[in-house]
Amino acid sequence: MNPMKQFERYFLAIFKLGKTEWNAKFASREVSRISDELATLKQELETARNNFQRVSSELVDTNNDFQPKMREMERKAGHVESLNAEISRWYSDLSRRLDMALLSRDTDGDTPERGAATGDDIPSALKSEGFQTFQDVFYNRLENKYRGSRSDIKARVKIYLPDVESAFIRTEGKPVLDLGCGRGEWLEVLRERDVPAIGIDTNQAQIEEALALGLDVRHGDALQAMADANDNSYSVISAHHLIEHLPFESVAWIAREAGRVLAPGGILIFETPNPRNIMVGASSFYNDPTHRNPVTESVLEVLFETVGFCPVDARPLHPHERLGEFMQRPGFDPDLAHILFGPQDLAMLGTKPAGAR
């Protein structure tokens, strides 16, 4: 038998024996590692370029030594970027082959040829294990590239610590439930403050990243996690940048269930992109293809009040770094500056009254 044919049969056998998850985890880790290495090299290159431009006018002799070093870093960055692309192509093809093998395998067990799936197979293919894993890896890479570094996100969410620690004390040490926990930055911040927390997410690639840090994360759906939770069992339920991914009825259901699941004195936290910022509402909101609709402050405020939370606190957060510049620019309308460069996120916090059941 042709060696390549033997290899393909062996590869298919691995999938059939349940090795799919291992391969997906391995590929995800390799892609993340290479991406991190590439980002580091690009940062070094950018720093080198900036330094060169700053001193070249004064230190002409340095130019002769600096140019070869810069070219070497460019070469390394190009090599890592090429390797990263190669691994990504390999992983993408791996997930496609898995789908084709499971959906369209021949009666004798041979691996199907490229494009063997028919049009009738497409609905099943979109829900298949291989394609779902591919989407998880894509979304994880999208967040790593555009949402911000782990340290950036940790710095942002620390703004909630006074509220959470107060709720933790009021509820006599009940844990936190974080819905849509992603890479686990918020869980890591809570662990650093000795606040027990559980994270729920559907993205296996991000769960693996959080598990590698020893965080308590579980694969699951936010609505199911709320349905399974006991009455009065959590001090805080948080959902950072989750609700804009859901139909509104799901958002409302989570909020209503939070009134049951939170212990008296506990708080519900929703954070979402702020559509009052035009740059967010008209542009950056759509950088995430899984976003559905922006959710406004007015809608969330009435929703929390309808559940019975009291008090309800709306907090615009994270203004653009250029807001101060435009607020102080002569002749520039401060209101316009705020609309364009004001808070990019909106947080809504609701407290379950102490006497509530």
Image (spheres, rainbow, N blue to C red):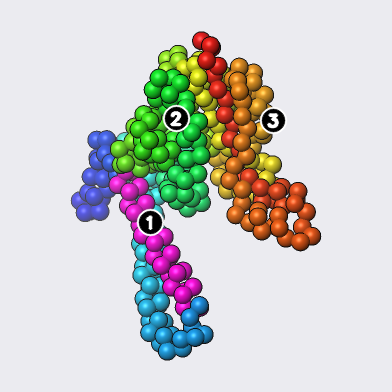
Classify residue 317 by image quadrant: top right
Residue denoted by label 1: 36
Q: Position of residue 83 (x, y in %)?
A: 35, 62
Q: Is residue 322 visible?
A: yes
Callout 2 crowding tier (Cα within 10 Å): few <14, some 14–19, many ≥20:
some
Q: Position of residue 150 (x, y in %)?
A: 42, 48
> Relative to 36, is 121 above or below?
above
Callout 1 crowding tier (Cα within 10 Å): few <14, some 14–19, many ≥20:
some
Decide which of 302, 288 is in the foreground and name it: 302
The nearer-to-camera label among 1 and 3 is 3
Q: Secondary structure at mark 3?
A: helix
Q: Which kind of residue does numbered mark 3 sit on?
A: Ser
Give the residue drawn at x 71%, y 47%: 339
The label on residue 165 is 2
Classify residue 216 by image quadrant: top left
Q: Tell whether 211 sits left or right of 297.
A: left
Which mark sits nearer the N-terminus, 3 or 2? 2
Q: Secondary structure at mark 1?
A: helix
Q: Which kind of residue does numbered mark 2 sit on?
A: Glu
Tell me the distance, in whole angstroms, between the alpha carbons under discs 3 and 2. Answer: 27 Å
Q: Which kind of residue does numbered mark 1 sit on?
A: Asp
Callout 3 crowding tier (Cα within 10 Å): few <14, some 14–19, many ≥20:
few
Q: Which residues are magenta?
A: 24-53
Which mark sits nearer the N-terminus, 1 or 3? 1
Decide which of 82, 162 is in the foreground and name it: 162
